Image: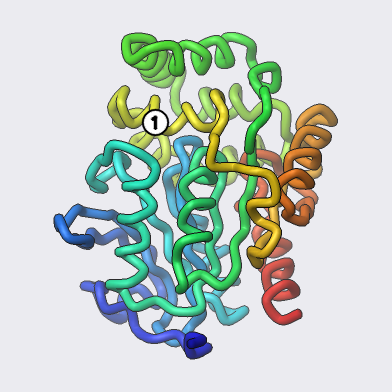
Amino acid sequence: MSLPAKPQANRLDQIGDKKRILRYWQTASVGPDGKDLEYMQFGSDELRPVVFLTSVEYPAAPPWGFCIDAANEGFGIYCIRRPGFGASAPVSDLDEQARLLEAFLEEADLENVILISTGSANPVAARLALKSRRITYSVFANCVFNRDVMGEFRPAWFGRLLAQTIESRSGARVSLSAIRQAGRQFGANWFYQTCFQKSPGDVAYVKAHPREMAEAWEVSSNITPETYQLEMGPSLLGDPFLTDGLFRDLPAIAISGEETTESWRSGFEREAARLGIPTAYLSSGDIMAVYQSGMELLNLIRQKVSA
């Protein structure tokens, strides 16, 4: 039985009409164990829900201007801080994360959902997209899938810190401590501009949105080593869930930014072909492409869901 096309009100909402014009974070207790999930909703209830799953790179909401543009295009923006981030309760593995996120969609009674995931959120998003009947289109951005990307990270010391994360729990603790120290010493904006240096669009986004970047830093720098290791493991060690042809029958697209490197592009396209998912590129940005090229993203979604 197909779902009705018209979205309905979020049954978990606690703030009412304020979300029509402001980005408010709220917390819902979902699933059989009542675990907390922190989320933001922007726009009136009749808009089609676009649900962002945030990543360790940027666990913050899209900019206010993007949310306004989305509402004008008929989309209401949700942004979920996944388990272990902010006020969201931690979980033990990716499957439990997917079940908790599915419970949120069910209990909120969201229908005809467009799912957008970025970076380290993609392994969970893949499981959720294939599991939830409420998701009708998925966008996977800045995907690693199953390939060796350790040589892609800049500066080199940042890549070495990430490699430490997957070696052991103590390695994750040391890596996270070093990142926190760098942010405290030089500032969050310096940290993000340094780690996003390959892409002029990413750096431009950081400079233009200091409030969002400060919020992202506050959340990411306060995760536990356990959450950090769970985040990075599937991308850096490989994810056995991503079998050949997995996305062949899924209404979805994998996207990247034009400003990525040729080595990233070739690996991304090779993995997308193996998994059976089409690809597209946004003109500005790399890690932050879906935010830096927000209007392009909305146009792409509109084109795909109305085709």
Q: Position of residue 286 (x, y in %)?
A: 69, 40
Judged left or right of residue 137, residue 303 is right
**Residue 284 is at least partly visible in this image:** yes
Residue at (65% x, 35% y) in the render: 203
Q: How is the image coloured?
A: rainbow
Front residue of this view, candidates 181 and 39: 39
Judged left or right of residue 139, residue 279 is right
**In the rendered image, the vertical position of residue 289 relative to residue 153, given as above or below:** below
Residue at (44% x, 11% y) in the render: 167
Front residue of this view, candidates 23 and 144: 144
**Residue 76 is at least partly visible in this image:** no
Q: Quadrant of residue 40?
A: bottom left
Front residue of this view, candidates 148 and 288: 148
Q: Position of residue 137 (x, y in %)?
A: 60, 68
Front residue of this view, candidates 307 and 14: 307
The residue wearing badge 1 is: 230
Q: Quadrant of residue 299?
A: bottom right
Which amino acid type is shown beneath numbered disc 1?
Leu
Residue at (30% x, 59% y) in the render: 25
Residue at (43% x, 48% y) in the render: 60
Judged left or right of residue 77, residue 220 is left
**In the rendered image, the vertical position of residue 234 relative to residue 54, given as above or below:** above
Q: Position of residue 79 (x, y in %)?
A: 42, 58
Judged left or right of residue 184, residue 136 is right
- Structural crowding at the residue carrying mark 1, measured as other residues with C-alpha within 10 Å and reported as few (<14), some (14–19) or many (≥20): many
Q: Quadrant of residue 251?
A: bottom right
Q: Please give the count of numbered marks on the rendered protein.
A: 1
Q: Quadrant of the C terminus?
A: bottom right
Classify mark 1: helix, strand or loop: helix
Q: Position of residue 163 (x, y in %)?
A: 52, 14
Given the current orientation, which residue lies at the most extreme front position?
A: 244
Given the current orientation, which residue lies at the most extreme left position?
A: 33
